[in-house]
Image (spheres, grey):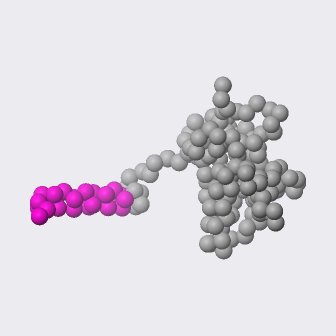
Amino acid sequence: MVPPAAIALAGALIAASFALVVSVRSNLLPAAPTAADLRAAKHVGLVRERLLRFSDTAAGEVLVTDAGNGREVARIGQEGSGFIRGVMRGLARERRMHGLDASRPFRLSLWDDTQLTLVDLATGRTIELNGFGHTNRAAFLRLIVPETQAVPGGPR
């Protein structure tokens, strides 16, 4: 037997959760600021930005090209960055689900505060890449910062 007080507490928790969601959705309570909102409030500037296209090759590689000039930026083989392959596979799947154009580029942006963001210009989805750890962030950072330059936000 479940004590009636436990059932009442569980019901109250569900009702409170529902009330909070409705309050945020109806703008009675403010939603948490996004990373973009926080950057704007702190006046964080853009360091570098690059429009990129990602495509699969017949050899099973991911070809990364600059959307502005069509030049090859990188080829990621089977042994290459699994993180880039996984992120791009998920974004491509989302585009297919919505019937969106697969040729639209992605915007990779590096900010003054060393944050790195990837924006899908077809869906509007933004991925804050710093949240995935230094190694995964570095995989994308190589696509925007030439290897001859110091890597902002890298290990010191």
Q: What residue span does the magenta drawing correspond to?
A: 1-23
Quadrant location, the N terminus: bottom left
Residue at the outermost bottom position:
99
Quadrant location, the C terminus: top right
Q: Is residue 33 left or right of residue 103?
A: left
Q: Is residue 27 left or right of residue 62?
A: left
How many dots with numbers? Answer: 0
Q: Is residue 78 above or below residue 97?
A: above
Residue 37 in picture, x, y percent from top left: 55, 45
- Does the image show residue 47? yes
Q: Residue at x 58, y 45 (%)?
A: 132
Of the pair 69 and 92, the residue shown nearer to us: 92
Q: Is residue 7 magenta?
A: yes
Q: Residue at x 62, y 38 (%)?
A: 134
Q: Is residue 27 magenta?
A: no
Q: Residue at x 32, y 61 (%)?
A: 18
